[in-house]
Image (cartoon, grey):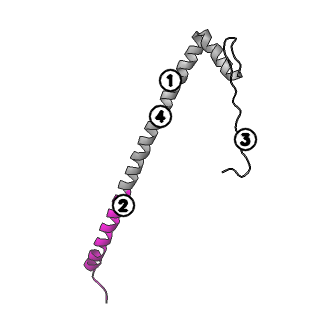
Amino acid sequence: MRLPARRWLWALVPLLVVLVGWGWWQAVVAERETRRELLELRVHRQQLEEANRALARQVEALKREREARARAARETLDVAAPDEVLVIVPQPTPTKGAK
């Protein structure tokens, strides 16, 4: 028994509605995920910009201030100025059976 074309159309309409609804929902979910990622990237960019500003301030201080250069050299080389005391704390060594 063959169904007329109209009956096929009415049988396919609910399927079409379901497919359109599913596609719309997938788009909504993807847009939410994209917005979340965008927010994370903006926060990360702000953190990087703050770090860059701090580094730029350090560079300017090193260019202008002799004491800043001396301090950076002492910290990098682990040496002390004549009026400073340098304390070196050894790293703890793990013992056998320690958790």
Q: In whole angstroms, how far apart are the C-alphas of marks 2 and 3?
A: 58 Å
Q: In whole angstroms, how far apart are the C-alphas of marks 3 and 1?
A: 38 Å
Q: Nearer the viewer, mark 2 or mark 3?
A: 3
**Callout 3 touching callout 1 (CB < 8 Å):** no
Identify the mark nearer the N-term, 2 or 3.
2
Q: In whole angstroms, how far apart are the C-alphas of marks 1 and 4?
A: 12 Å
Left or right: residue 23 versus residue 4 is right
**Callout 4 touching callout 3 (CB < 8 Å):** no
Residue, disc 1:
53
**Residue 98 or residue 54, whichever sits in front:** 98
Indicate yes or no whether the magenta region holds residue 5.
yes
Indicate whether 97 appears above or below 5: above
Q: Nearer the viewer, mark 1 or mark 2?
A: 1
x and y, in percent, of residue 97 in the image = 71, 52
Q: Residues within 10 Å of mark 2 (few under 14, many from 20)?
A: few
Indicate whether 16 appears above or below 52: below
Query: Start and end of the magenta stretch?
Result: 1-26
Indicate yes or no whether the magenta region holds residue 99.
no
Residue, disc 3:
93
Image quadrant assignment for residue 19: bottom left
**Callout 1 touching callout 2 (CB < 8 Å):** no
x and y, in percent, of residue 89 in the image = 69, 30
Left or right: residue 64 versus residue 35 is right
Identify the mark nearer the N-term, 3 or 1.
1
**The residue tagged with tag 2: helix, strand or loop?**
helix
**The residue tagged with tag 1: helix, strand or loop?**
helix
Q: In whole angstroms, how far apart are the C-alphas of marks 1 and 2?
A: 45 Å
